Amino acid sequence: EQRASEEIPRARQQESDTAVILGDLLGTITVPQRAGKIFSDLYYRHEAEIHHILNENLFLVLQTIGLVADALPTLRLMSERNGELLLDSATYARANNLYEEFRGLAGPQLTADLEETRSYLDRRTTKKDSGEVLINLNE
């Protein structure tokens, strides 16, 4: 039992190191304050369950990395676009599929919170004639 508790700080340190490395690779992504709070609150409220789902489903991690890599240019431009995120339809469809996969693995409370967050995003999403999807995260 003591050994397991000793492993937790090491795991947290590895996660922390990974976050720093990923943060360096991603650069600065500025999200409007209210949207950032919604996403952060969701994550921290369900951190243990999210980690469990990701640890048990490596394909979700790989899908997420690919999605973030593809969306990175537009994520970085979000502050210049005043909180607007412009995605091509293929990237938006991949994000939607990832959401559905994750929601299918979540427990009842995380599912409810994911659906609430999705509703927040849907109210701010417009499909353009060009096929692109505009998500306006401003309040």
Image (cartoon, rainbow, N blue to C red):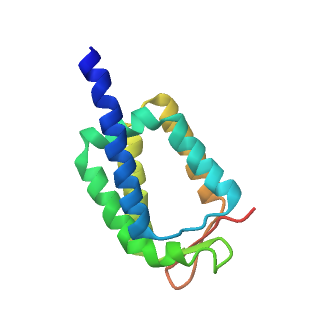
Residue 71 in sight in this render:
yes
Quarter holding the N terminus is: top left
Q: Nearer the viewer, residue 44 or 129?
A: 44
What is the x, y in percent for residue 126? 61, 71
As drawn, which residue projects farthest toward the top? 1
As drawn, which residue projects farthest toward the right? 139
Which residue is located at x 54 percent, y 35 percent?
45
What is the x, y in percent for residue 134? 58, 73
When asked about the image quadrant of residue 72, the answer is bottom left
Q: In this view, does 41 lie above or below 69?
A: above
As drawn, which residue projects farthest toward the bottom? 130
Which residue is located at x 47 percent, y 71 percent?
27
Which residue is located at x 52 percent, y 75 percent?
76
Q: Is residue 100 above or below residue 138?
A: above
What is the x, y in percent for residue 35? 64, 56
When asked about the image quadrant of residue 88, the answer is bottom left
Quarter holding the C terminus is: bottom right
- 129 to the left or right of 57: right
Residue 52 in sight in this render:
no
When asked about the image quadrant of residue 129, the answer is bottom right
Which residue is located at x 40 percent, y 33 percent?
49
